[in-house]
Amino acid sequence: MREIKFRAWDKVEKKWLYFNLYNVNLYQKELSNAVLDGLEFYLFTDLHDKNGKEIWEGDWFKSYWRVDPFIIIFFNGSFRGKYPKDDPEKGFHFDDYEAKNGKVIGDIYENPVRRGE
């Protein structure tokens, strides 16, 4: 069964908060102390890269066969890859096969990546 996990970027504290549906009460104080307007929420894809690292919405990913890194997004009910300047509709399918043939190289907040790096 898929584990439903979330992370939230705290724009004020500049850090990630991690939780799932089962331990959200453990983080209730930390989440309630943060202004909800100051949080950006992201989903776990339930996929891991070639190094076993969890892949999250909002991660930068470098695929074996794609030239430029791309961002993992959740759009129209599925996880997709998207180049920064493209609209979400132009995103492409992202699945376990692509995940196992590439790696997470950062996220959009702590270590952003630019095209060509």
Image (tube, rainbow, N blue to C red):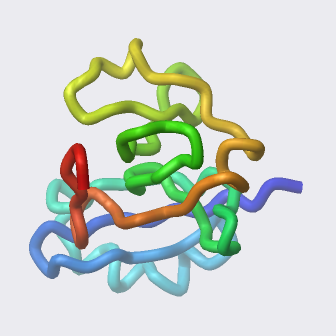
Image quadrant holding the C terminus, namely bottom left
Which is more toward the observer, 48 or 98?
98
Query: Residue 14: horizontal and vertical position, in percent?
Result: 17, 77
* Residue shown at the point (62%, 51%) measured from the top left: 45
Whether residue 25 sits left or right of residue 85 in the image: it is right
Q: Quadrant of residue 10?
A: bottom left
Outermost top residue: 89
Q: Is residue 68 above or below residue 35?
A: above
Query: Residue 50: horizontal and vertical position, in percent?
Result: 68, 65
* Residue shown at the point (25%, 35%) measured from the top left: 84
Which is more toward the observer, 106 or 22?
106
* Residue shown at the point (36%, 21%) measured from the top left: 88
Query: Residue 34: horizontal and vertical position, in percent?
Result: 21, 74
Q: Is residue 72 above or below residue 94?
A: below
Outermost left residue: 12
Total numbered circles? 0
Image quadrant holding the N terminus, namely bottom right
Q: Quadrant of residue 8?
A: bottom left
Query: Residue 111: horizontal and vertical position, in percent?
Result: 24, 69
Which is more toward the observer, 32 or 52?
52
Q: Quadrant of residue 59?
A: bottom left
